[in-house]
Amino acid sequence: MEMIDLAETQAELFGVFANATRIRILRTMAQGELSVGKIAEEVDLSVQNTSHHLRFMKDKGILKSRRVGQRIRYWIACPDLVNGLLSRASREQTS
């Protein structure tokens, strides 16, 4: 039973990376902690659409957030893991 639960958890985690918009957001967030508005501007999405993707990734444990005044700022929870996966995918594409 534990093996099935682990596989399901891993599938959910990798599902985050199965969406081009979320990958663009994660690449942008490699800069560090950013506000929703700044991320939306960088990836050319509405704030509402960006917020949806950010909440999804936060729920999966990929991102963390904090409120600063009226704004919510997000950052990558495990930057080494995320950057490693994105780098690996980039290397595969250029090979």
Image: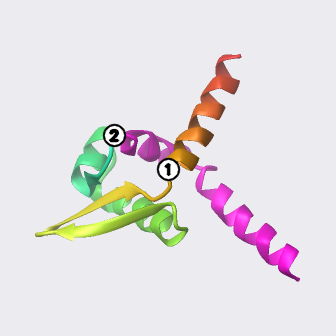
Residue at position x 60%, y 50% from top?
17
Q: Which residue does the numbered mark 1 point to in the structure image?
A: 22
**Residue that extends furthest to the left in the rendered view of this protein:** 69
Q: Please identify the residue farthest to the front as the structure is shown.
A: 80
Query: Residue, x 39% and y 65% (percent of image)?
Result: 64
Tell me where the magenta segment starts and ends, as one range: 1-30
**What count of labels does the image hold?**
2
Which label number is shown at residue 31? 2
Query: In the displayed structure, does residue 30 sit left or right of residue 33?
Result: right
Give the quarter of the image for residue 20: top right
Depth-wise, is mark 2 or mark 1 nearer the camera? 2
Q: Which mark is residue 73?
A: none
Which quadrant is home to the N terminus? Answer: bottom right
Q: Give the secondary structure at mark 1.
A: helix
x and y, in percent, of residue 6 in the image: 78, 71
Q: Residue 70 lies in magenta, yes or no?
A: no
User: Residue at the location (72% across, 63% down)?
Assistant: 10
Binning the other alpha carbons within 10 Å of mark 1 as few (below 14), some (14 to 19) or many (20 upward) gives some
**Kind of residue at badge 2:** Gln
